[in-house]
Amino acid sequence: MKFNQLGLTAELVTAIESQGYTEPTDIQAKVIPQVLNGKDILACSPTGSGKTLAFGAGILNTCTKWGGIQALILTPTRELALQVTTTLQKCAQPLSIHITELTGGVDLATQRQEIRSAHIIVGTPGRILDHLTTKSLSLTKLQYLVLDEADRMLEAGFNKEVHAILKACPTKRQTLLFSATLSKESKQIAKKYMHTPFHIKTETNVNPDQLYHTYYDVTHEQKFPLIVHLLKKTKGIVMIFCNTRRTVDRLTMNLNYYGLKSLAIHAGLEQVQRNEHLETFHKREISILVCSNVAARGLDILNVSHVYNYDMPQTSTEYIHRVGRTARAGKNGTAISFVSSGEHGELRLIGREATIKIEKQRLPPLIPLKNTIDFRSVVPLFRRGQGTKNKKGHETRNRRK
Ligand code: ADP
Ligand code: MG
């Protein structure tokens, strides 16, 4: 299958192929003709399967320079908005179609200016709604509404905003809903706002035979020495997931202290820092990324060889999303979970619900690492001033991820 067999204009096919994409992925081959047919789409396909271009190509194919804002793409995070914008911009440039990103962290006045020349808007629900409320964004010419990573967006608490935005869109439009999983909430959105959507589901591109699931039985205190031991023993491109941003900060600081260069990414970082960290990781200047769940979904980080669950995820879906960062595109990957006494319930749940075998590993002899930096005694790096000091001058916990 080639891109020129899908009904796209020759100009767009050239733009796509000049990105080095020779063949459409499974989801692209299935979605693009349906979008061109004017259908609403409900697509469920895993991270890394090429969803961006699956909805992007159809939109770019019909967008015109004179048409005003013709498409709105909603994403759950700023990172994803940036990623979608960058990907689509490359194909849009030769067609003189402008894509504008509207997310928090950038001032409204600048964005208002940019909206004027936009044909496609990519943004997070909160900020889009801000612009709709203040009438700086008008959707009267809208033809496409895309909900990218719909489940993640609804889970992140954007339910109200998403409904409000959907109501603000012209009724005569195409709605394209994309997600790695399809929750009840996503299906409700589909039922309420979509016209007999075309259902598309593609298989995982994470090859289950190439993903090896393991776990270690540990005490809470053994987690840090164990991760240091394992990271020193096996080299690779590593993502480590923790459940709170506090743990992310603390672990990153301590790994760096022990000579394991690593970067943190979580929602408490300034946007510029998050982008910088991701870029550094992409360039492989640093090969350890410590993240909270915010980074688990949708982010396109290729060739990750090891995914660590420093803390166990709470659900099997979350586990699948995290470990889905590895064993992609024909490569092998290893998922390593640290299970402390309170986390066996999660382990059992994940094994059962995801029907995977997570193999127990023998704990290696560990050297106790006494000199770790205590997070209470240092000013945390890279955080927005959200923690507050209590009487003793200690930072109080901040559980937001
Ligand atoms: P998803 O949104 O499903 O997670 P993305 O759209 O982010 O996936 O794409 C994942 C990766 O696959 C990106 O690096 C992208 O450049 C690449 N990709 C997308 N489409 C193709 C294609 N047709 N051929 C080769 N690589 C592609
Ligand atoms: Mg995506």
Image (spheres, rainbow, N blue to C red):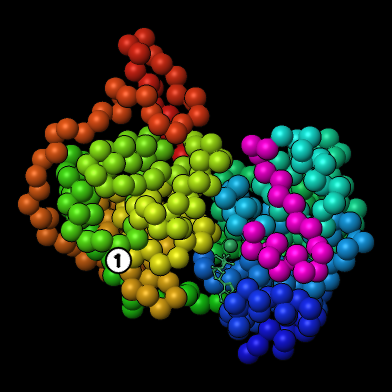
- Horizontally, residue 65 falls left or right of residue 397, namely right
Above or below, 386 against 273 in this view is above
182 left or right of 339 in image: right
User: Is residue 384 inside the magenta stretch?
Assistant: no
In the image, residue 86 lies at what x, y percent? 64, 59
Please state if 317 lies on the left or on the right of 210 as rendered: right
Q: Nearer the viewer, residue 261 or 63?
A: 261
Location of residue 156 (image quadrant): top right
Q: Which residues are magenta?
A: 86-106
In this rendering, is residue 106 above or below 147? above
Vertical order, 43 against 285 (above or below) = below
* Secondary structure state at the residue bearing disc 1: strand
Residue at image position (25%, 30%) is: 373
The CB of the residue at mark 1 lies under 8 Å from ligand 1: no
At x 51%, y 41%, the residue is 273
Q: Quadrant of residue 144?
A: bottom right
Question: What's the residue at 10%, 40% (across, down)?
Answer: 368
Amino acid type indicated by mark 1 = Thr
The image position of residue 348, as x and y in percent, is: 29, 58
> At 43% across and 54% down in the image, what residue appears?
281
Q: How far across and down, in percent of the image, does residue 197 sit?
A: 73, 71
Q: In the image as oriented, which residue stretches furthest toward the top?
A: 391
Residue on which disc 1 sits: 334
Q: Is residue 74 shown to the viewer in this render?
A: yes
- Does 88 lie within the magenta span? yes
